[in-house]
Image (cartoon, rainbow, N blue to C red):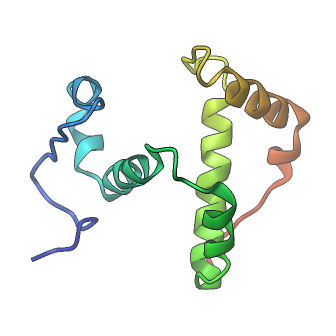
Amino acid sequence: MKNNYGSSDKCVVFNTAFQRELLLKPMELQKCKEYKAAQDLATALNGYGWDSNRFAESTKYYHRTIQQTLMRSIVAIIKMVGSNTYDYDLRNKSSHELCKRIVESGLLDEVSLPMV
């Protein structure tokens, strides 16, 4: 039996608000471990009890290579959310505007986060 993030030829179906959106996602994306991990994170984030500072503090106990991979993922999210093609509404407009400012600053163009 594989863990929740191992490869699988089955598509995971969630009984949440994401279910409708899942039908619109390419099947290849739904099968990947990154998609499954993102869905698990979305489940954890979906509540008023999430403490972003406690989450950030918890990551300092990750192995250094995992910290680097997490930062590469965060940079990828910032670039995606800050892109001109990103679809947003009033609920995440501030996130889009912040990410867009970061992308436009050019700071991410100079970032190198290699797998070590």
In this view, 64 is above or below 8: below
Quarter assignment of residue 86: top right
Which residue lies at the image location 31% right of the left edge and 53% below the top edge?
36
Choose between 30 and 42: the one closer to the eye: 42
Residue reaching furthest to the top: 89
98 relative to 72 in the view: left or right: right
Quarter assignment of residue 65: bottom right
45 relative to 84 in the view: left or right: left
Which quadrant does the N terminus fall into? Answer: bottom left
Which quadrant does the C terminus fall into? Answer: bottom right
Choose between 52 and 8: the one closer to the eye: 52
Q: Could you tell me residue 77's position as x and y percent? A: 60, 43
Q: Could you tell me residue 98's position as x and y percent? A: 78, 31
Choose between 74 and 113: the one closer to the eye: 74
In this view, 111 is above or below 14: below
Choose between 57 and 96: the one closer to the eye: 57
Q: Could you tell me residue 115's position as x and y percent? A: 61, 73
In this view, 88 is above or below 111: above
